[in-house]
Image (tube, rainbow, N blue to C red):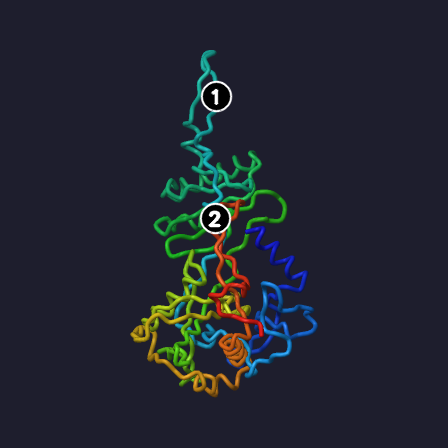
Amino acid sequence: MSKKIIDIFIATLGKRYCGLSVNQLVSKFDDKLSTLYFNTVDDPNLNCQASFLYRVFAPNQKMQHNLNVCKFSLLTSGLLTKASYSSTSYDATRSVSKKNFLEDTFSYKINGTNHTSLYFRDKWLLDASDDEYGGVLVNADRLPSDPDKFTFVLRASLSHWKVKGKKGVWLKLPLEKCDLVPVAVKEGFQYHHAERGYVMMTYWIPEEPCMLPSNASHQVGVGGFVINDKNEVLVVQEKHFTPALSGLWKIPTGFIHESEEIFTGIVREVQEETGIDTEFVEVMAFRHVHDVAFQKSDLFFVCLLRPLLKQIMIDDLEIQDAKWMPLVEFVEQPLIQEDDMFKKIIDIFIARLGKRYCGLSVHQLVSKFDDKLSTLYFNTVDDPNLNCQAS
């Protein structure tokens, strides 16, 4: 993984690779300033040439339509009816060591005889484990149910952890023990994040700025351009939308689930909404916008997919209708022509179909630093299967 990133960096320095540059636009549908990231190597200020292994369109070729990537389902515009978040928040359980405080012992003497006991710690301290950053994670399965007992052991535990030099405390309170939340708040704990079955609270012990990571700051959405051999685009109309968007045919969109890849998430969304199985080709561009839902930021990845089926079966819960629409008709929709963000995404899509643009394809690698399978997205136009040329 690290070597591949260095290769891309060196290729960029040698003007043999062109990444995604920043383009800021305002969409008329939400009046928000959005940042669109896509290849623009026709810009002489970028000092980037399409040659060697990594290429995008040549500087002398322009796209036929003036368009900008748009997240076709803006939360604030009501285009998306799904309400879910990408789960990218810090998970303290992933960084917990096997050492458990309850395994610690203390020694004492009775009549000159040495004894070792666990009784004191079992009875008066919360069961907790070390994390990798000098903090502790409280065992949610062994919390007392009685608020008064919890108050006592929580205070004793905080004092003990302070003496031990611990820093952050992660306290996960399950729904069935919600009576303990007011106790934790009174003792100085703060909300970090919540899921359906629990609330995570934190406490910073040192008298210095808190270094605990914040909750997830982004939600991740995807949209899929699916085009068949008749030059028709797979489009949908949703059951719930704002009046201003009445009549708009848009690409299938949705949110990425927890622990789901971008390239598998968009395939799932297209299949759920239309019944069409697809093959992921690449990410063509992505949009970044802030203060979308509950003050969170939003990342929206525009993907190109290849259909494996043609028969449409719509999802009755959220989709009003779906069909294969000729590309020309899709592009000429007034709501698309009137919006800079909508138009830009169409231009990129058309340039990609004409082999004048190359997006980011999927490459899965394992990093030695965490032994996890990661997905790296970058340009590889030397791959003949991508059918992408810089001409």
Numbered mark located on residue 83 in the image: none
Q: Secondary structure at mark 2?
A: loop
* Residue ID at (37%, 79%): 237
Q: Amino acid at mark 1?
A: Ser
Quarter of the image with the C terminus in it? bottom right
Whole-percent x and y of residue 308? 35, 70
Residue reaching furthest top? 112
Give the residue at x 62% y 44%. 207
- The residue closer to the viewer here, 370 or 59, is 59
Q: Are marks 2 and 1 in contact (CB under 8 Å)?
A: no
**The residue tagged with tag 1: helix, strand or loop?**
strand
Q: Nearer the viewer, residue 220 or 229?
A: 229
When the figure is inspected, residue 280 is found, relative to residue 110, above or below; the finding is below
What is the number of the mark on residue 372? 2
Q: Which residue is mark 1?
A: 107
Q: Residues within 10 Å of mark 1 (few under 14, many from 20)?
A: few
Q: Looking at the picture, which amino acid does disc 2 mark?
A: Lys
Residue 61 figure quarter:
bottom right
In this orientation, does residue 192 appear?
Answer: no
Residue 133, percent from left and from top: 55, 42
Residue nearer the viewer, 37 or 39: 39
User: Residue 127's spot in the image, x, y percent?
Assistant: 43, 37
Give x and y (percent) for residue 211: 59, 48
